[in-house]
Image (tube, helix red, strand yellow):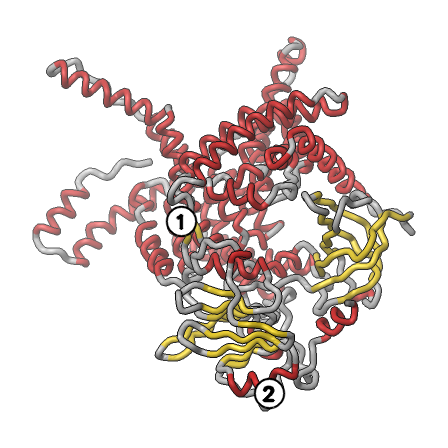
């Protein structure tokens, strides 16, 4: 990283001494910025902003209220690409046209991905017989969850049958991935966001081609398939069976949550973990210990690369006559690919796999492997293949942390490339000792634990804004937890996974899992100690959505630029982002998209749940957005309920009615200021605010903030929104007033 240009401080100081002038300051900085841009151009750093531009285009696609015209977007990308080629001799125009081409290409990638995965999704509850192939099974402490590739569904026409459904079953499943099942199930539409700006499972389910979720009614047993499954399903089903067998072997050998964590670290299967253990490692800031991250992928690839190369070097004929280094790189690429497939495909592991393959590919091509460019190519690969991942916490945290670590590594490498100043043997003995101590501390900073802590601090800072936005909390003790996590992975997880997987077929792997269990026990003891410390988790309220844009740009500016002056551009962006983060999105009433439950702010300022049946996930989302650390089951009920519905009051005394039966409309519409219902309200129901089935179909989840100036609305759905995962409400005539919705009637009939 370039040192501050000499004379700039004196120049600014003279300007300040003679009276501050914005024009004079800009005139002083303009040539410096021009020189910094020239240096960045020579270092080819602007290329790194192409994935950012393409990612912005993909996000534009995902958040747009209506579906873009794909061929127009594609033609626009081509047009700007041609203009960029023609303007390559003029740097300013070339940068602008290239950025616009990348932006349009990212939006096209989002639309193309949606077109490829488009499949039917339920819009109401269905109870009936299902038949299909099991794609994946995730065992849990109680029961299991599995994915079913549907071949036939009772009560659903072929063009309305979901391609894939996710189901839960009680007890130990009597089937495995690859089996063909027929059983009775209760299917529901994928859940929409419980809070405006919150996690939208329906969108993620659409891109995974999951058209419904639900649970098995009765038994589900394997039966002979009417026809064989395709090769891809059989291949991944075999992988899933192997992963489950190894995960259960590790879990049974160690036992408890320690066994569940060990199984997750070895196979990527993490559904065996209890909620208490999840909260413990989350409070310690080491939740990523149960994910397959870049550390595991890099270690596995490195072990195989070095191992293969050392083995081939044992044969002089091969070592002297053939490029065994390239052979080892190619074999390590296959090993990394096999490891990535076996441990499951998540964004973090995909990023690590892409970077590893690019790094080893550079060895094959005899080209230098530039790490930040590797990350840029990995980001482009994710944007092209799974652009929906950009809105997920996994992508944001993984790429931000790795980009920060690479930036620190680059800065450290640049510093080590300069000759270090030597201590001169002059001055008093105390002065010489002081200079010697300074040199020692400098070496420690460059090579020792201080450097690791600095890297961890930078990675934590880069991910802090995404942690705050996605999870509404920060973990300040992550500087302690992260180094322990890395040591755990390097010393226990990866060696145990490789050695245990080899010895398992011979039944000699028991001691390996005992060794891994001892390491997990140690890290969990430390995690409990960290999690019990004061301030281990700092809750933060939901903040303005636009602020994350500026916070993201601040992170990108800090890690992608190399010159110190260009890095300073992150400061105003950070200021704007923090300004938005400071404006908390406070609400007094939150309503779920189904209208079956809500949250009211009470006189003590805390939220309470209104509804006959609580939805734990929705309650958790509301509490987190309100910076409330209570667990969802600990929330108190708001008001009172009977068979017709519930009534309650907000902190300022406003009456709120939740109508669950049509007979309650007459009284509640006359008395309550806010009426909420999953039913269609009658025409005479005219309270100040009505959130019935018809209104919620247009708005989705709603939050209301009551103030002297009026009511501030926030809705999960934009006006006129119509996307494949969020279809516009039907324009057909609604059911008679007070009628129960079709799904409620079906459910009640089944009971």
Residue that extends furthest to the left in the rendered view of this protein: 18
Q: Position of residue 654 (x, y in %)?
A: 44, 78
Number of marks: 2
Look at discs 1 and 2 and give the one toward the viewer.
Answer: 2
On the image, numbered disc 2 is attached to which residue?
666
Q: Position of residue 638 (x, y in %)?
A: 51, 68
Quadrant assignment for the C terminus: bottom right
Is 289 rendered above or below residue 129?
above
How far separated are the C-alphas under marks 1 and 2? 45 Å
Q: Name the residue nearer the viewer: 443 or 154.
A: 154
Q: Position of residue 412 (x, y in %)?
A: 36, 30
Q: Secondary structure at mark 1?
A: strand
Residue 476 found in image quarter: top left
- On the rendered structure, is 22 left or right of 336? left
Q: Name the residue nearer the viewer: 286 or 619.
A: 619
**Other-residue count near label 2 (Cα within 10 Å), few / some / many at <14 / 14–19 / ≥20:** some
Q: Position of residue 341 (x, y in %)?
A: 68, 38
Label 1 close to label 2 by CB (< 8 Å): no
Q: Name the residue nearer the viewer: 333 or 633.
A: 633
Q: Which label number is shown at residue 43? A: none
Quadrant assignment for the N terminus: top left
On the image, numbered disc 1 is attached to which residue?
538
Residue 309 found in image quarter: top right
Badge 1 or badge 2: first in the primary sequence? 1
Residue 36 found in image quarter: top left
Specify whether residue 446 is in view. Answer: yes
């Amino acid at each position: 990283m370039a040192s501050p240009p000499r004379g700039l401080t004196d120049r600014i100081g003279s300007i300040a001494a003679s009276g501050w002038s914005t024009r004079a300051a800009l005139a002083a900085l303009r040539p410096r910025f021009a020189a910094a841009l020239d240096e960045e151009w020579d270092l080819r750093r602007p290329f790194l902003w192409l994935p950012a531009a393409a990612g912005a285009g993909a996000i534009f696609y995902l958040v747009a209220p209506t579906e873009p015209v794909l061929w127009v977007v594609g033609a626009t990308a081509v047009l700007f690409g041609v203009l960029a080629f023609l303007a390559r001799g003029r740097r300013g125009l070339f940068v602008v046209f290239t950025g616009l081409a990348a932006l349009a290409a990212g939006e096209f990638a989002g639309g193309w991905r949606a077109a490829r995965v488009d499949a039917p999704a339920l819009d109401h509850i269905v109870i009936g017989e299902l038949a299909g192939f099991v794609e994946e099974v995730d065992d849990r402490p109680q029961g299991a969850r599995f994915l079913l590739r549907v071949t036939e569904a009772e009560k659903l026409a072929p063009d309305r049958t979901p391609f894939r459904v996710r189901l839960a079953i009680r007890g130990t499943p009597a089937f495995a991935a690859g089996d063909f099942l027929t059983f009775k199930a209760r299917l529901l539409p994928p859940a929409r966001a419980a809070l405006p700006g919150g996690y939208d499972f329906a969108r993620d389910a659409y891109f995974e081609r999951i058209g419904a979720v639900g649970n098995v009614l009765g038994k589900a047993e394997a039966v002979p398939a009417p026809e064989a499954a395709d090769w891809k399903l059989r291949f991944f089903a075999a992988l899933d069976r192997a992963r489950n067998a190894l995960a259960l072997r590790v879990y049974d050998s160690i036992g408890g949550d320690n066994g569940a964590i060990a199984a997750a670290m070895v196979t990527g299967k993490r559904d065996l973990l209890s909620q208490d253990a999840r909260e413990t490692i989350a409070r310690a800031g080491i939740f990523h210990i149960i994910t397959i991250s870049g550390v595991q992928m890099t270690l596995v690839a490195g072990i195989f690369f070095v191992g293969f190369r050392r083995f081939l070097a044992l044969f002089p004929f091969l070592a002297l006559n053939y490029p065994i280094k390239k052979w080892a790189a190619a074999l390590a690429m296959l090993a990394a690919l096999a490891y990535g497939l076996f441990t499951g495909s998540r964004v973090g592991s995909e990023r690590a796999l892409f970077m590893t393959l690019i790094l080893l590919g550079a060895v094959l091509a005899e080209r230098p492997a530039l790490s930040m460019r590797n990350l840029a190519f990995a980001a482009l690969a994710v944007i092209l293949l799974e652009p929906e991942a950009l809105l997920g916490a996994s992508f944001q945290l993984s790429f931000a942390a790795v980009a920060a670590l690479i930036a620190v590594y680059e800065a450290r490498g640049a510093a080590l490339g300069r000759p270090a100043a030597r201590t001169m043997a002059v001055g008093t003995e105390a002065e010489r000792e002081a200079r010697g101590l300074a040199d020692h501390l400098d070496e420690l900073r460059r090579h020792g634990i201080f450097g690791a802590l600095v890297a961890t601090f930078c990675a934590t800072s880069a991910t802090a804004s995404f942690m705050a936005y996605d999870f509404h909390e920060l973990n300040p003790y992550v500087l302690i937890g992260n180094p322990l996590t890395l040591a755990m992975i390097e010393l226990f997880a990866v060696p145990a996974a490789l050695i245990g997987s080899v010895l398992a077929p011979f039944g000699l792997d028991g001691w390996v899992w005992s060794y891994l269990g001892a390491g997990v026990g140690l890290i969990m003891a430390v995690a409990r100690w960290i999690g019990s410390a004061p301030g281990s988790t700092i809750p933060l309220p939901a903040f303005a959505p636009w602020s994350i844009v500026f916070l993201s740009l601040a992170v990108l500016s800090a890690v992608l630029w190399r010159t110190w002056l260009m890095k300073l551009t992150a400061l105003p962006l950070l200021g704007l982002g923090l300004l938005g983060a400071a404006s908390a999105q406070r609400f007094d009433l939150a309503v779920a998209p189904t209208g079956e439950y809500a949250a009211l702010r009470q006189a003590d300022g805390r939220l309470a749940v209104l509804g006959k049946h609580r939805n734990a996930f929705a309650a958790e989302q509301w509490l987190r957005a309100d910076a409330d650390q209570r667990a969802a089951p600990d929330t108190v009920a708001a008001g009172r309920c009977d068979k017709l519905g519930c009534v309650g009051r907000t902190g300022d005394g406003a009456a709120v009615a939740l109508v669950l039966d049509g007979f309650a409309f007459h009284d509640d519409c006359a008395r309550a200021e806010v009426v909420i219902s999953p039913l269609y309200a009658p025409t005479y129901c005219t309270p100040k605010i009505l959130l019935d089935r018809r209104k919620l179909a247009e708005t989705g989840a709603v939050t209301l903030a009551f103030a002297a100036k009026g009511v501030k609305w926030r809705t999960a759905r934009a006006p006129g929104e119509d996307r494949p995962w969020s279809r516009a409400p039907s324009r057909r005539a609604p059911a008679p007033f007070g009628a129960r919705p079709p799904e409620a009637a079906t459910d009640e009939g089944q009971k």
